[in-house]
Image (cartoon, grey):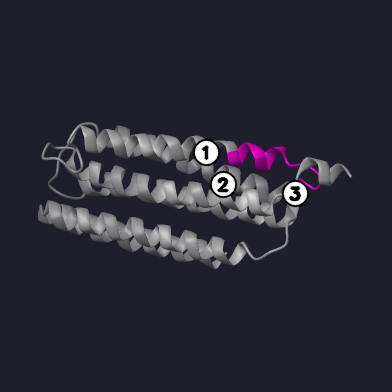
Amino acid sequence: MREIRWAAVVAAAGLVALVVCAASGSRNVTLLAAAATGMLLAGAAMLANWRLCWQARSIAAAKQAAVLNASLMAVVYGWGALAIAGMYYLSDLSWYHAYQYALYLAVPAALSAFYARRIETIDITGRTRPLRTGQALAGVQLLAMAAVIAILVATGKAPGTRPDWAANTIFLSGAAALIVVSALALAAQRRLRPSDQRLSA
């Protein structure tokens, strides 16, 4: 899908910008670059889902939405993982937890990509369980990302002044983008997925 390619280009450009900004030591510019990347990724997700919302309710349309949104989640998580690694290992910034949190973000990136690929390749005709599972996980993710933002704000780590300030800019912007993608994923499934009763009729 071209929307996924566009999101990947935005993530790559944002990654380069973040590494350059982090290397300059400017926290405000780094925060701005992270926020801009997050907003552009959220915007790409909204545009892609807006195009899908006009389709008729069907398993095929719901499947397409599930693949799209899981892929977008993978892009956001992957951007976060690479951005943290790049900012701390390609600049003078130092934080001994950097590799750990980069890996923490890489895991859901891989899982989201796996789910998207799995849904895309299997035949789910007449079955909604794989889609309902993804919908439930999107709901959990939305709540989790809202909690991340609340914790960052409540603890003064958004972005803060400690060595993890650069990572916190990614957590904040990435969580906001994932809230948008998760909400869109939930809305798309409600709009496009047929009920089990209709499938069995």
Q: How packed is label 3: few (under 14 Cα within 10 Å), some, or many (20 or more)?
A: many
Q: How packed is label 2: few (under 14 Cα within 10 Å), some, or many (20 or more)?
A: many
* Residue type highlighted by circle 1: Gly
Helix, strand or loop for disc 1: helix
Q: State the image quarter where residue 149 is shown.
A: top left
- The residue lying at 45 percent from left, 40 percent from top is 142
Helix, strand or loop for disc 2: helix
Q: Nearer the viewer, residue 57 or 89?
A: 57
- The residue lying at 74 percent from left, 52 percent from top is 59
Magenta stretch containing residue 35, yes or no? no
Q: Nearer the viewer, residue 126 or 104?
A: 126
Which residue in the protein does label 1 denote?
Answer: 139
Which residue in the protein does label 2 denote?
Answer: 186
* Drawn side of residue 7 relative to residue 115, left or right: left
* Residue type highlighted by circle 2: Leu
Quote the CA–CA distance across marks 3 and 2. Answer: 14 Å
Circles 2 and 1: CB atoms closer than 8 Å = yes
Q: Which mark is residue 194?
A: 3
Circles 3 and 2: CB atoms closer than 8 Å = no
Q: Nearer the viewer, residue 60 or 46?
A: 46
Earlier residue among tags 2 and 1:
1
Region rendered in magenta: 123-135
Q: How packed is label 1: few (under 14 Cα within 10 Å), some, or many (20 or more)?
A: some
Earlier residue among tags 3 and 1:
1
Work out which residue is located at the far right of the displayed protein and give it: 201
* Residue type highlighted by circle 3: Pro
Magenta stretch containing residue 126, yes or no? yes
Q: Position of residue 51 (x, y in %)?
A: 58, 67
Quote the CA–CA distance across marks 2 and 1. Answer: 7 Å
- The residue lying at 20 percent from left, 32 percent from top is 155
Q: Position of residue 57 (x, y in %)?
A: 73, 57
